[in-house]
Image (cartoon, helix red, strand yellow):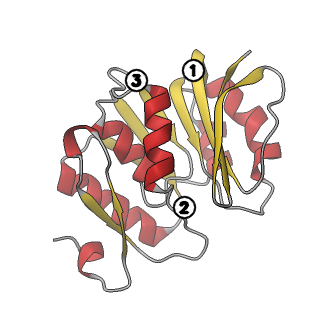
Amino acid sequence: MSQVQRNKSASRVRIIGGQWRSRMLGFPEISGLRPTPDRVRETLFNWLGQTLDGKVCLDLFSGSGGLGFEALSRYARQVVMVETDPAALVALRSNAAALSAAAEIVASDAMGFLQRDKRLFDVIFLDPPFRQGWFDRLLPAVLPHLAQDGLLYLESEYSLTPPEPFSVYRSGKAGQVHYALWQRA
């Protein structure tokens, strides 16, 4: 059992599909960290297809790792998980080791990563902290990293209108969370 799983203040997130279905992952209680709810993740991965065979994904605000580990569980070829919080990074590494997951875990802020890294991704998960104005800064920076036929997943406290060159592929709302999958128009 990992350090995070033994910690009584740790929270847990369940992988809902794929090879690690029903596995529970521990993560620390961190202010502002809100894992994507099971129901929303299930909807998202239904939209993406039950398997992500061969896809390269970026989980830009990894936090609990729920989205990134879910993608790996569904056979994504590679998932890059970017996170700044030291406790969350320890949990991500611990969970990756427990699953023998080939996650690339990067200690970095989102904008710094986007400026340094030049790779293209088939799916980019954007679930930044709420009420900090991230999307105005992120969308122009993330576009050069999205493969031509790539999809961009977003979670926000309000409904987002896609700027050029994006269009809404699918969207929904669960409680106070608005979520959408965008594609290039």
Give the quarter of the figure containing the C terminus: top right
Instruction: Name the element at disc 1.
Output: strand
Give the quarter of the figure containing the N terminus: bottom left
Location of mark 3 (residue): 55
In terms of sequence position, does the residue under pointer 3 or pointer 1 come before the other?
Answer: 3
Mark 1 vs mark 2, CA separation in Å: 25 Å
Instruction: Name the element at disc 2.
Output: loop
Q: Residue at x 38, y 84 (%)?
A: 9
Location of mark 2 (residue): 84
Note whether residue 87 is visible.
Answer: yes
Instruction: Say whether residue 122 is left or right of residue 32.
Output: left
Q: Amino acid at mark 1?
A: Gly
Q: Residue at x 44, y 32 (%)?
A: 46
Q: Are marks 3 and 2 in contact (CB under 8 Å)?
A: no
Of badges 3 and 2, nearer the viewer stands 3
Residue 56 falls in image quadrant: top left
Instruction: Name the element at disc 3.
Output: loop
Q: Is residue 26 above or below residue 77?
A: below
Note whether residue 181 is visible.
Answer: no
Q: Residue at x 41, y 74 (%)?
A: 28
Q: Residue at x 81, y 55 (%)?
A: 133
Q: Amino acid at mark 3?
A: Lys
Please name whichever residue, 102 or 23, is drawn nearer the observer in this view of the structure. 23
Q: Amino acid at mark 2?
A: Thr
In terms of sequence position, does the residue under pointer 3 or pointer 2 come before the other?
Answer: 3
Residue 38 falls in image quadrant: bottom left
Please name whichever residue, 102 or 169, is drawn nearer the observer in this view of the structure. 169
Instruction: Say whether residue 22 is left or right of residue 138.
Output: left
Instruction: Say whether residue 122 is left or right of residue 168.
Output: left
Location of mark 1 (residue): 150
